[in-house]
Structure formats: C-alpha cells, structure tokens
Amino acid sequence: MKIMILNSVTLFWLRRSGVGVAWLLLITALGLRAAESSTPAITRSADVVVVGGTPGGIMAAISAARQGQTVLLLERYDHIGGLPANGLGATDGRAGGLFAEFARRVLADYAQRYGAESAQVKECFEGRRFEPSVAQRVFEVMVAEQSRITLLYQRQFDAEPDNATLVGRRLTEIRVMDRATGKVEQVKGGVFIDATYEGDLAAAAGAPYRLGREDRQEFDEPMAGQAFKVWRGGVAPGTTGRGDNAIQSYNYRLPLTKNPANRVPIEKPADYRRADYVSLIDDVKTGRNVGLPGPRPEMEWEGIGRIVNMVKLPNEKTDANNQHAAFISTDLPEENWPWPTSSWQWRDRFAQRLRDYSLGLVWFCQNDAELPADFRARCAEWGLSRDEYPQNGHFPRQVYVREGRRIMGEYLFTAHDTLPVVKGGRPPVHRDSITSSSYNLDSHAVRKREAGRLNLDGIFSWPNAPYTVPYRVIVPRDVEGLLVPVAVSATHIGYSTIRMEPCWMALGEAAGVAASFSLKRKISLREMHVADLQRELLRGQANLIQVRDLAPEHPNYAAVQMLGLRGVLLEWLVRADKPATAADIAEWHRILQLSPESLATGPVTRGAYLQLLWEKISR
C-alpha cells in the first residue's frame, strides 16, 4: 500500500511547472485521502501470528497457545476449518497428536448427539469421516478453549511485498485488510506461520518457491513432468517427463444427499456452458472411461457415480469428489493454473466460475435431453444438503486448492522420500521427522481432455510406504521468523502425498511448538533443537515414525519413536512386549554404535530395553 505525501518541495516544483491552485488543492486532497486510506487503522500484536484458518493453521495456533504464547489467528473467510469444513469429509491418511484429538472429538460429537451405538457413530469411522458442519463446529470449539488465541475473521492477506516488513531477513510485521470495513491493519509478531494453501505470506516475505511440474530428469521421480497413466494401470503413451508450469486441478467437494427431507434440487446456474459437458454424452452411452477405450457395456455406472466419486458420510450425505475414471468430472483442469500467484480478485472470479461449472455439470446430467433417460433419472435423485452452508446456497464456500506455491526450504521433499529403500521396507528415515504420513503419490489431472488421448495428463496414483517428514521442509530459505507448514518444500510429486489434511495438521502442530520454543529460548527457527521439539510432540502422542503394533499409550512409545528415527526400527513391528534376545540387543548396540555390554541385568522385554537405550543416549 503506497502512501502519497505532497511535501513543500513537491508543491514548489508543481508551481514552477505551471500547475494551478485548484489542481494543487485537488492533488493535495487526493494525496491526503490516499495516505489516510493506506494508513493502518489498527495495530495488533501477538507472540505468534498465524495467517490462514486452515486445519494446519488451527493446529499451529492451538499448539502455540498451549505452550503459553499469545496467538493471532487470521482467516480470510467468515469461517475456519478450510476444506474439512467445506466438503472434504473423508480424510486420507492418519496422524497422531492434535489430528487424533480432532478425530476423537468428532466421534464424541456424534456419540453425544445420536448415541454411542448409532449409525452416525459407525459411519464416522472413529472420527475420520464427518459432515462439514461437524468439522467446523469441532474446530471452533478447539480454538475457543484457548483463551490466548484471538481469532479474527474476514482478514485478507494479499501476497504483495508491501504487506510484509522485514528487518534484515527477519519478518516482523504484516498488513492485512479487514474485508468488512476495507481498512488496513498492521500486525506485529514474534514468529509468523503461513498456513495458507497458497503460500501467500511466504511469497510476500521473499521466500523462494516452486510452481508447476519438475522435469523427470531433475530428480528421476516416477510420473514427474508430462505423464499419462491408465487409472489403476501402467504408464501410457504420450508420457514425456517434460517439466512445465501445470498444477493439478481444483474442484469443490460436494456433500450430496438423496434424502428427500434434506435434499435441495440443483438449479441451472446463471453462467451455464453446455459445451463444457457435451462430450460426456457419448461417454455415457458407450461406457467409455479414462484408460479403457471403446464401449464397455459390462461396466456399471450408478447414475451420478459416472461423474463423481462418492464416499459415504453420516446422515445420508456423501463426500462427492472428482471421478478419476471419467474424462469429465468436478475437476476443472488448466483454468486454475494462475490461482497460486493471482490476486484474490482473480481467485474469487475463478471460484464463481468453478461453482457454476460444478452445478452446471450436475444439472446437465439430470436434465440434458441427449443423455439416456434412465441415466438422467438416477442422477436426479441427488441434490445438495439443506443443512450445510445455509448462507451460501447450500454450496461449499472454499475451492479445494490441492497445490499452490511450494516453498524452497532447508530440505526438498521428493518422491524418493516416500519409496521403500528395499522391497517391503521403509523409505529413508529422517532423524528430524515431525510427523509420519502415509498416502500414495497422487495427482489429479492438469489438462483437460485431449483428442486422441485415452487418459488425462497428470492424473495418477503411485504406491509408496509410510514415510517421515523432516522439520526442514517447513523452514523457508532466506526468511527468518517464519514457518510454512502447508505450502511446504517439495517437488510436485513429493507434494502430491504430503498434501493431506492430517499431515498438514501434524505439521501445523509442530510449527506452533517450534514457534514457542524459538521465542522462549531466543533461538532461530533454523537452529531449532529438533530433539526437544520431538519430545514435546510425543508428549502430545504425535506419530513421528510409523510402527504397526504400538499405541501411543504404551509406556515405551516415546523411546521407540525416538530410536526408530535413529535407524533402530528396520521392520514395521516392534513386538515391544516380547523378550529382548541377545541378538536383538547386539544389533541395537551396533546400530547406535554402543559398546556390546547389555544394559539389563536380567530378562527384559524389547520395549523396556529400548527404553533403557534411549535413556542412555539421551542423557
């Protein structure tokens, strides 16, 4: 925000140039008005400032507040919760810590309202599937419990350098706009956390970032660059591996229902473009599919399931996502490419375009006369959920931004960080892990249907194994006093698995604790004592490395986790309550480079011996 000030020297030269008094008065008035409108109306401050009320931002705010810090949580919209509060009700992957607490609260919410043996409790899958309104309510309660958090809605951060002030390389204050009043607010903080899906704050502060797809030759990642893959099949013709500026497509996650008592009919949108959908007519008639050429009459398409992939949620709703087996679904590739670096004005226009496209797609399937009548009738059974988003026409309020900027951090996460080193084994283990995660390498399409192609460019799922995520991916280069737990440092392929809300929530939790440690101990975020951070996360039952047979409640859990990050757990099973053999002890001592003498004076379980080892090396 530039401030125009006419000083005496400026006025002197304007007079010398022949500018009249009236013009001088007008220019002066405009200058004063510009200066007045650009001057921050309010100055706020907090120990920790979190930009973005996404799940990652919420968990960052909560963890920092629980550490005793004052927190400002700034959210652009009139609600918090990001995508889980906007249709993404089927969470992929798991995490411990605050995500596990969130899931327990979701489960308790359903149990309290409907009973412990209710269908809703069963359908919420231990709190990992939920209606948008339930997710939002749980997030709001979790934030409201923290008296040190000040939550401000309708605060828009624009990714302009003028909105971020740095002293040297340290970010010290930012400027946000109150969308309700149009006034600018100046916000000072000890540590800032960029929890936006786009990485807006990091970019404004000067942190370098990546966009688009890396070339296959750069990191030799599977499916890097231009890539075509048969869904649930092999790599297809047309794959070149060339890098480009493409990002995976966005959509809205639709909580649809066929319950007549709660169903809102889909209306034809104002900006209806039938041309967007006409190629679907022949697909429906022939049964044609992505990667499966020609008519396939043996394939059964259940009405609207032809265009959306539906996961059942409680109360007869669905999380309706893009249907990967269809050439046309709720994703809108290509048109979203400018989103990461565009203004909010552009983003809002695209959001409306995507809304009209999504509603138009369903309306088309329910009403277009060229589609088979039985298909239209099956599609017409579905509508929006009346009890969701009542102030927004029962339609989700946020676009699913699957990928925006990706910062360049102290470590670049690639596909290889998720692929087993040996068959059946673990990927490389990061000693500074702040969460374990598990989801396939997975991308939605980056381009629309292309003539002659049997697949969509960019859409794939590639198997990997549960992996560790290093602290360094949330620490941006070139900027101090800033952590970025959502737009993390990764390649397009690496980011395709990290981009799950449970993982973002775990990274946000770690960012909040790290911010607090930095302030309390007066140390740089870049010089964080990660072992101390890990111990604190484990006190909250975080999961830093995956093991398949040990719950966080086990007395040896923390020791096992910390030693696992030091290479002791080559297998997925700990067998903590089995006797430790001499061979076990010898191998553990070898890995940790300890003298061979046993630390135990008699028989001991594996878990108990690992506890002894951890106590010895952590003194």
Image (cartoon, grey):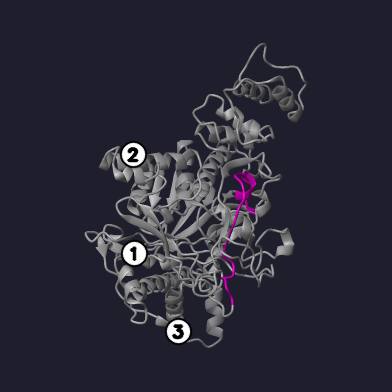
Q: Quadrant of the C terminus?
A: top right
Mark 1 surroundings: few (<14), some (14-19) or many (≥20) residues within 10 A: many
Principal SS element in the magenta part? loop
Q: Nearer the viewer, residue 196 or 360?
A: 360
Q: Considering only order in the chain, which callout, 3 or 2, is on the residue closer to the N terminus?
A: 3
Q: Amino acid at mark 1?
A: Phe
Using the rendered image of the protein, determine whether residue 193 is visible from the camera's viewpoint: yes
Q: Considering only order in the chain, which callout, 2 or 1, is on the residue closer to the N terminus?
A: 2
x and y percentages locating residue 175 in the rendered image: 48, 59
Q: Mark on residue 23?
A: 3
Mark 2 surroundings: few (<14), some (14-19) or many (≥20) residues within 10 A: some
What segment is highlighted magenta in the picture?
A: 453-480
Q: Which residue is mark 1?
A: 395
Which picture quadrant has residue 587?
top right
Q: Mark on residue 19?
A: none
Q: Nearer the viewer, residue 374 or 612?
A: 374
User: From the viewer's perspective, is 403 left or right of 181?
Assistant: right
Which picture quadrant has residue 499?
bottom right
Q: Which residue is mark 2?
A: 108
User: From the viewer's perspective, is 616 left or right of 321?
Assistant: right
| Local SS, label 3 | helix
x and y percentages locating residue 580 in the rendered image: 65, 21
Between the C-alphas of marks 3 and 1, the distance is: 50 Å
Which picture quadrant has residue 532?
top right
User: From the viewer's perspective, is 607 left or right of 76?
Assistant: right
Of the two numbered discs 2 and 3 in the rendering, the one whose residue sits closer to the viewer:
2
Residue 478 is a magenta residue: yes
Between the C-alphas of marks 1 and 2, the distance is: 26 Å
Q: Amino acid at mark 2?
A: Ala
